[in-house]
Amino acid sequence: MPSMSPQSDPTLSEQQTPIYQGRRRRLNLALLTAVNLLPLLGVLFFDWDVGALIILYWSENLVLGAYNILKMASVGGLTAVFPSLFFLLHYGAFCAVHGFFILSLLFDVPPAFGDDPPWPLFLVFLQMLLDVIEQVFALAPTEWFIAFVGLLISHGYSFVSNFLIGDERASATVNGLMAAPYKRIVILHVTIIAGGFAIMSLGQPLFLLIVLVGLKTSIDIGLHVREHKQARRTDQ
């Protein structure tokens, strides 16, 4: 009688194959796509320019960072307090410099600390981040906040469905989570910023703004699937 290998056992294969599919995958991708298309409405009906698009995409980094701290706390509990504080300082500094660069080159309005004295040591980067956030919210169109709330909902749903309800938390580590957001930022924002400056040099035609939204959506979906494809629980 021939023996049945793990690959030929459909039940074992379903349980152990590192795939990301089923209803959970479909709902995640549908919500992710819908939220990514909100900026398209801004471009078509509210005259958003490339600056509005890029500061929205920058603000998504803040959403990712906030949920990443929740992931770290969920995995490590009290032992994640110090790593979370370190991540807040390091990731906050990264986002602050990134935002400073965007505001300086796209809007020619670099953040300033005003009359407030600089915060001590590395806390100055958090001070810079808060100032960048203030500038971004001041420059953003009114409808921009709807898209920002959509990002909160989309990433929040992914956090609950994939990390808390799904089994991603079981294999996650605090140290691994500390590095996770940077991969997405580097891949996505190098492409987006390069495309944004190319569009500005051509006078920001509507067609290219739509292409930029489509490019970001495509990259985002690809990064999302790659990130979660190792989830081992398949929804029925």
Image: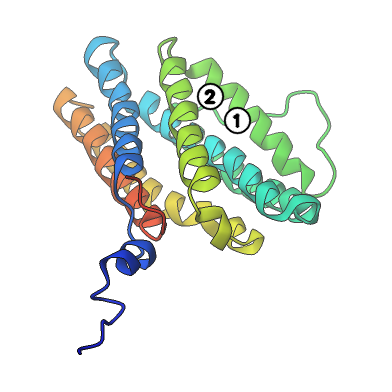
Picture layout, residue 84 above or below residue 33 = below
At 31% from the left edge and 22% from the top edge, which residue is drawn? 38
Element marked by disc 1: helix
With 129 as the anchor, is 226 left or right in this view?
left
Number of marks in the image? Answer: 2
Does the residue at mark 2 contact the one at mark 1 (Cβ under 8 Å)? yes
Callout 1: 10 Å neighbours few (<14), some, many (20+)?
many
Residue at mark 1: 132
Residue occupying the point 54% across, 35% down: 63
Identify the residue under disc 2. 136
Q: Secondary structure at mark 2?
A: helix
Q: For the C terminus, give its image quadrant.
A: top left
Question: In the depicted view, which residue is nearer to us: 56 or 174?
Answer: 174
Is residue 18 placed above or below 165 in the rendered structure? below
Q: Quadrant of residue 137?
A: top right
Q: CA distance from mark 2 to mark 1?
A: 6 Å
Q: How is the image coloured?
A: rainbow
Q: Amino acid at mark 2?
A: Val
Which quarter shows the N terminus?
bottom left
Residue 186 on image: x %, y %: 43, 54
Query: Residue 36: x and y, percent?
Result: 32, 30
Residue situated in front as seen by the camera: 180 or 92 = 180
Marking on residue 169: none
Look at 32% across and 48% down and name the residue there.
Answer: 191
Within 10 Å of disc 2 (Cα), the crowding (few <14, some 14-19, many 20+) is many
Residue flagged by tag 1: what amino acid is it? Answer: Val
